[in-house]
């Protein structure tokens, strides 16, 4: 594969050349399969949120201003124009906090990138193989840009899934449109004009807006570039470009290291629990202690959770609603010990205000220790009888060290679909996604995703 220059000059053009010149044969079989896993997981999370009250709100709002019915809304009978379909499907894919995670950056890669591709491919009659190729490349660029500004970018308050996701969506859509490197570079520059969203909003509906905007903005960027709209050559790395404006010096050595040889898609992970990824090792530790020592709520006097400072920055917060619960150490511990589970019902609005959970949360203390690795956690339980039990989890279930299997992802998708879209033939959807690289016509899959 062609290796683009790795200088600080004209980053957009170098990335665009890589994308435009990429051939399907350049993508290793294992990475193609990882792309299918990511798309299948994304479809499951979108179907699981297809009738969520927050999603209904966005759908009703955009129904008032939508254009022609060009694309499917996953799990719904309504059809929207491609820009609004991309926005809505990105929101549903991310809404339950159950989507995939690129752990090095904490980007959720699929939600901003896959929905605009499905909308565009459906409108233009493009193949599943082309969609999958574009998806892998989009994830590659969004995650590499994330690598090149991490960890400062996210720590500063930028919601990296949205801010980097828009670039992934832009190049993916540009690849699907088969536009040349020059126009793809402009698509990246235009995407810089769309990039935004802050982590202060993570526990609110404004987070959803940021994810939807990334998907729609990326698609708009590619369409605008195709039509001839131009952007600055150094919109990403220039002195007044995206990286500097968001406060970071772009690490171009990281951005271009082993490009085309080492694939970020291979580093994608999938959640067994519908909550912030930083909480997964905490949950695993609690479930392990509960099981090993047969602990019940009356047995427990107090619990101390120790983790990297990032854990507390993201998840040491008061809980007033379900959104708060999904990024709360205290709620996750309470759910794990009270119910022996951490599924959708344990993070529901009802659970967030359940008196038993509210009371148990008061027994939980969180403390930071920089010596604990990001993604790891230590949990110590003091019993009413004065005993102390503790355990440490270095790698959470679903991490790269303990990945979910294909079968586990399938079961997760089945459970999500049965909850909100029982009319979907989910087994047919799963079979079709595993054959996506052999699919010339996406029509049958889109019809399966829009049950009568």
Image (cartoon, helix red, strand yellow):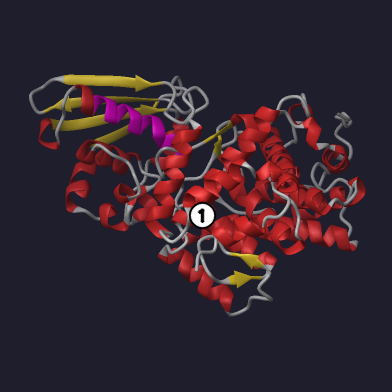
Q: Residue placed at 34% from the left, 33% from the top?
A: 283
Nearest the viewer among 125 and 65 is 125
Left or right of 72? Residue 218 is: right
Nearest the viewer among 179 and 28 is 28
Task: State whether residue 90 is above or below residue 51.
Answer: above
User: Mark 1 sits on what residue?
Assistant: 46
What type of secondary structure mainly makes up the magenta span? helix
Q: Residue placed at 82% from the left, 44% from the top?
A: 239
Nearest the viewer among 130 and 188 is 130
Density class for disc 1 (Cα within 10 Å; few <14, some 14-19, many ≥20) is many
Residue 83 image position (x, y, % from top left): 68, 65
Residue 85 image position (x, y, % from top left): 63, 64
SS class, disc 1: helix
Q: Quadrant of the N terminus?
A: top right
Left or right of 301? Residue 145 is: right
Residue 357 visible somewhere in the drawing? yes
Query: What span is colored magenta in the figure?
Result: 277-289
Residue 87 image position (x, y, % from top left): 61, 62
Q: Is residue 172 located in the magenta-colored stretch of the structure?
A: no
Task: State whether residue 285 is above or below residue 79.
Answer: above
């Amino acid at each position: 594969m062609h290796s683009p220059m790795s200088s600080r000059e004209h980053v957009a053009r170098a990335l665009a050349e890589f994308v435009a010149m990429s051939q399907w044969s350049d993508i290793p079989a294992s990475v193609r399969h990882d792309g299918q896993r990511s798309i299948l997981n994304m479809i499951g999370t979108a179907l699981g949120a297809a009738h969520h009250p927050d999603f209904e709100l966005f759908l009703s709002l955009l129904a008032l201003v939508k254009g022609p019915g060009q694309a499917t809304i996953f799990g719904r009978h309504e059809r929207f124009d491609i820009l609004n379909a991309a926005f809505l499907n990105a929101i549903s894919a991310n809404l339950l906090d159950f989507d995939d995670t690129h752990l090095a950056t904490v980007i959720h890669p699929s939600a901003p990138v896959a929905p605009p591709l499905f909308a565009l491919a459906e409108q233009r009659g493009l193949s599943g193989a082309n969609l999958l190729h574009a998806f892998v490349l989009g994830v590659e660029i969004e995650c590499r840009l994330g690598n090149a500004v991490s960890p400062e970018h996210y720590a500063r308050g930028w919601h990296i899934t949205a801010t980097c996701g828009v670039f992934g969506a832009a190049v993916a859509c540009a690849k699907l449109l088969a536009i040349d490197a020059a126009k793809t570079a402009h698509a990246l520059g235009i995407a810089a004009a769309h990039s935004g969203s802050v982590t202060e909003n993570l526990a609110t509906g404004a987070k959803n807006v940021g994810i939807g905007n990334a998907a729609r903005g990326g698609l708009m960027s590619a369409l605008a570039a195709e039509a001839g709209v131009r952007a600055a050559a150094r919109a990403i790395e220039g002195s007044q470009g995206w990286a500097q404006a968001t406060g970071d010096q772009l690490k171009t050595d990281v951005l271009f290291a082993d490009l085309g040889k080492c694939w970020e898609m291979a580093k994608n992970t999938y959640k067994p629990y519908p909550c912030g990824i930083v909480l997964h090792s905490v949950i695993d530790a609690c479930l392990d202690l509960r099981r090993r020592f047969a602990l019940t709520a009356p047995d427990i006097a107090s619990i101390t959770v120790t983790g990297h400072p990032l854990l507390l920055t993201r998840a040491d917060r008061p809980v007033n609603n379900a959104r708060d619960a999904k990024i709360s150490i205290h709620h996750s511990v309470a759910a794990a010990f009270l119910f022996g589970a951490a599924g959708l019902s344990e993070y529901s609005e009802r659970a967030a205000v359940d008196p038993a959970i509210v009371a148990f949360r008061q027994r939980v203390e969180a403390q930071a220790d920089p010596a604990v690795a990001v993604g790891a956690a230590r949990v110590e339980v003091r019993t009413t009888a004065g005993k102390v039990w503790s355990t440490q989890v270095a790698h959470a279930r679903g991490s790269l060290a303990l990945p979910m299997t294909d079968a586990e992802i399938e079961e997760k998708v089945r459970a999500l679909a049965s909850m909100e879209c029982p009319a979907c033939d989910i087994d047919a959807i799963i079979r079709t996604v595993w054959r996506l690289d052999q699919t010339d016509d996406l029509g049958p899959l889109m019809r399966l995703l829009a049950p009568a």
